[in-house]
Image (cartoon, helix red, strand yellow):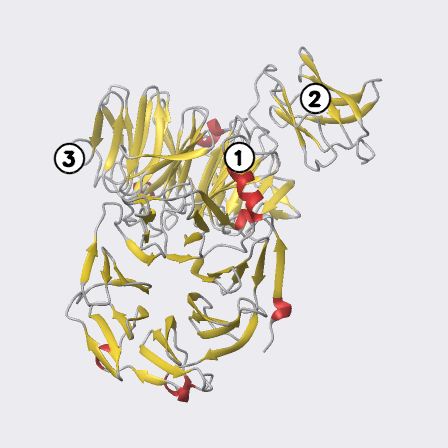
Amino acid sequence: MNHQKNRSSRTWFIGGIILLTAKIYAQEIPLGSWRAHISYNSIHSITQSPSKIYAAASNGISVVDRADGSLSSFNKLNGLSGTGITALAFDDNHNQLLIGYADGNLDIVRQNEIINFNALKNSPTIVGTKQINHMSIQQPYAYLAADFGVVVFDLIRLEIKETWRDLGVSGTQLKIYSSTFKTDSIFLATENGVIAGNLADNLMDFNNWRRFDQGSFNNPVQSIAYFNNKVYAAINGDGLYNYVNGIWTKETFLQNEEFTSLSSFTDLLITTSTQVWKLNSAGVLTELTNSLTQKPRCAVEDSNGKLWIGDGRNGLVSNTSGTFQTSNPNGPTFSGSFRLKFFSGTVYATAGGFKPDFTPAGKTEYVNYFSLGSWSTLPEYLQQDVTGIDFSGEKTFVASYTLGLQVHDNTITLFNSGNSPLTGSRVSAIASSAEGLWVANYNASQPLHLLKPDNTWQSFSFPVTAAQYPVNLLIDNLGQVWMMLNPSTGGILVFNKSTNQHVYLTEVQGAGALPSRKVYSLASDRNGAVWVGTDAGVAYFPDPSRVFSGNINSIKPVVNGRVLLRDEKTTAIAVDGANRKWLGTERGVWLFDQFGETQILQFNELNSPLLSDKVNAIEINPLTGEVFFGIDAGIVSYRSDATAGTPSFSKIKIFPNPVTATFTGTVGITGLATDATVKITDVSGRLVWQTQANGSTATWDVRDVSGRRAATGIYLVIAISQDGNESMVGKIAVIN
């Protein structure tokens, strides 16, 4: 069966892209461009070529040059077909890297191109999951162990030779975890024991497989490898078995362990959930200990006898320099993001504290922050189930869903149920205000607390049962607290401390008239309006002071005759410098104008570098206009054309300048007064282009009002503030 027609080739000068990515990472990215913030701290697969080590995280490939130790990477932004990487293998004969995915996709990386083979992903005949779990190479084929069977892939023709499906007893579907070879036979680790077949036989017929599925083998076999003339199979909670002369024998060591992988080169490397072991050909077992290996998932040995360990916490760990060190491209320490927070030029990311059912997530992750083009961690802060970070004056606050609230100033104080009003130490959200820090306490009779600057507490209760389950907070421009409540009970509770008023907003007419009681996001815009995202559309309250009037209804923007995003669960809202609304959903991101009535952009994982469509958080750097998307699969950012405005002109920057013949992007003009009018003229004063700034940024596509490319020459940039009291003039050169 020839599937060659289902592949697509994208030519990338890979080395140049990686260098460009590294170069721009330390500075602002161009308008309209993307930046991927990939975590390489959880490595699950490693393979090697004569010159490089390749290590797979879920969203990218880390590449180590074995000669000089330099790092580079592949991800969706520079050529890979997607995310959800599950397997790696290197084909030495043809100098190509194979990358397998959870959706059945296969990428083949060559020197100057990445070829995507999507026949498995798009196959209508394969029922159920198509995940590629492991790949092994026996020239001229690669054997892809998948959830539905094994694909024999021709490494020369780049096409499927045959597919072995339904390999279970009586032809039932059997999940294959990995494969290895012994002389003329292939051995498969499956969800029910081991099966073996002669490569000369018709292995598409399930009757032609030998089965080892009795006793201990009547269980999943996690991994399999050939070493020292034996086949080794690892069974979780049982032990390691070797196969010689038709008999499986259980080893006396490493019994009752949880295994993650087996690999062989000079020695057999055995990875368990906590340790890495080496078995040599004399049968001597050695534990390979180091402080960086905390959650080992795989290990390989290179031709120099050096170890490369894939760890679930510290990424790629190696002793190639003599001592064990990490080799990871810069990025966050975790994939996915629960909440994002911008403060003082820095974007902070937290991994999250609770699951969708609001039980503790059990995550232990550092608070990460992005500044000056690179990611760093805050190891001195809480790490367990962190729900958010906020700032007030010289104080930093870190919230945990299991440990309470940590306050950093000259000292570090941890408030919990033992030394504060917090019930169960479950802090689901925090938000700073002029009065102090507001603290949401989940599943508490007093669900809202105010921690004052003198570290004293004030607590509040409400005669609304749903109010006991706050999951997020917003402080509006009036200082009122908006408590987003567990969607299962739903609604929003708004509290004004100065008047001691509260109101419960739901979908009921006169009591909010929300599109739905299930609320998933809140944001306050430049005009003070509060925007609400639900599972049935988006609405806003233009005057938050009126919510206590006794008869209040939200405004629901209408687009094409329908409530804005009526069919989406709006999980995140952010407002940019032009007062436009960035709306995150479980099907991607939308950008609408300030009133939510005109769509400007729409991004999803098919038409953009978004790692997936499920958006958890959106945060904007108002100084640069870079929009950060926290997605269930990681973090990416996009340089938009809007920045926070100021009443007056500041340091004007026009970039790029000059505009060369090869430039096809958008010229950015920043440092403008808020929403200034911008005119571009030639030196004779003829108007070429006119626009209005988005906040303090305006853009020009280097075309005149007729849509033609501007001719070579010097052009004047004239900007006038909205009130007409200020203006500025700049110059830009166009060279065609």
| Vertical order, 519 against 639 (above or below) | below
Q: Earlier in the sequence, mark 1 or mark 3?
A: 1
Query: Could you tell me which secondary element the residue under label 1 belongs to?
Result: helix
| Vertical order, 360 against 44 (above or below) | above
CA–CA distance in space, label 1 to label 3: 49 Å
Query: Could you tell me which secondary element the residue under label 2 belongs to?
Result: strand
Residue 122, given in percent of the width and then of the height, sits at: 56, 67
Q: What mark, if any, has residue 418 been given in the picture?
A: 3
Residue 404, given in percent of the width and then of the height, sits at: 24, 36
Identity of the amino acid at label 2? Thr
Front residue (pair 224, 403): 224
Q: What mark, if any, has residue 23 been given in the picture?
A: 1
Q: Kindly check if marks 1 and 3 are in contact, taking CB atoms under 8 A apart as contact.
A: no
Identity of the amino acid at label 1? Lys
Identity of the amino acid at label 3? Gly
Q: Dividing the picture into quarters, in which one does residue 118 lie? A: bottom right
- Residue at horizontal 28%, vertical 63%? 267
Residue 198, given in percent of the width and then of the height, sits at: 40, 84
Mark 2: give few (<14), some (14-19) or many (20+) Cα within 10 Å: many
CA–CA distance in space, label 3 to label 2: 57 Å
Query: Could you tell me which secondary element the residue under label 3 belongs to?
Result: loop
Front residue (pair 192, 20): 20
- Residue picked out by circle 2: 677
Could one spot residue 509 in this view of the protein?
no
